[in-house]
Image (spheres, rainbow, N blue to C red):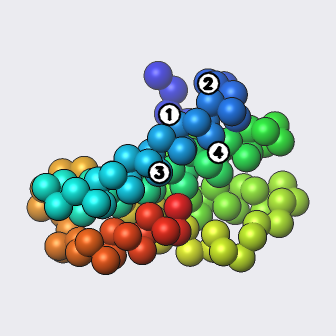
């Protein structure tokens, strides 16, 4: 598998939006369940935001690399002339939750309040 972002991105923008909505639902369900770690709710919030912006880019035939970095995706959108709504500007805070939080030992304790705030941003 190429990692340079030059390969064709699979799926349609509608499929990416469907996955984004599913991740957002998972984040909400996880946040409400006190047996689920807050970092796992944050992971799904990040995935929802990432997939949503990728769906928008795909819908406009804008190429993007296979990255989890939401701020990089925003820069690609802005470079292509897209004006992003101000209320999504903080979504870049979600980027670290894409990889680092999937395994123990990397992060401080994530509170339910913090997870809920991140889900709100997705």
Cα separation between marks 2 and 3: 21 Å
Contact check, label 2 and label 3, Cβ < 8 Å: no
Of label 3 and label 4, which has the lower sequence position?
A: 3
> For the residue labelled by badge 1, is the local secondary structure a helix, a strand or a loop?
loop
> For the residue labelled by badge 4, is the local secondary structure a helix, a strand or a loop?
helix
Q: Residue at x 75, y 56 (%)?
A: 77
Mark 3 closeness class: few <14, some 14–19, many ≥20 residues within 10 Å: many
> For the residue labelled by badge 3, is the local secondary structure a helix, a strand or a loop?
helix
Q: Residue at x 33, y 52 (%)?
A: 29
Residue at numbered disc 2: 10
The mark lying in front, picked from 2 and 1, is 2
Relative height, residue 120 to residue 30 (above, below): below
Cα separation between marks 1 and 3: 26 Å
Of label 4 and label 2, which has the lower sequence position?
A: 2
Relative height, residue 107 to residue 23 (above, below): below
Cα separation between marks 2 and 1: 14 Å
Residue at numbered disc 3: 24
Given residues 25 and 19, the one toward you in this image is 25
- Residue 110's image quarter? bottom left
The mark lying in front, picked from 1 and 4, is 4
Given residues 79 and 111, the one toward you in this image is 111
Q: Position of residue 103 (x, y in %)?
A: 18, 51
Side of 84 where 99 appears, left or right = left
Q: Residue at x 49, y 68 (%)?
A: 120
Mark 2 closeness class: few <14, some 14–19, many ≥20 residues within 10 Å: few
């Amino acid at each position: 598998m190429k990692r340079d972002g030059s390969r064709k991105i699979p799926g349609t923008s509608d499929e990416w939006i469907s996955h984004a909505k599913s991740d957002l639902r998972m984040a909400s369900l996880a946040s409400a369940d006190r047996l689920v770690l807050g970092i796992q709710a944050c992971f799904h919030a990040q995935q929802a935001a990432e997939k949503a912006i990728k769906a928008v880019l795909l819908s406009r035939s804008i190429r993007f690399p296979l990255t989890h970095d939401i701020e990089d995706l925003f820069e690609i959108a802005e470079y292509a002339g897209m004006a992003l709504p101000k209320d999504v500007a903080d979504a870049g805070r979600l980027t670290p939750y894409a990889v680092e939080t999937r395994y123990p030992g990397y992060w401080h304790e994530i509170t339910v309040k913090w997870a809920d705030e991140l889900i709100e941003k997705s």
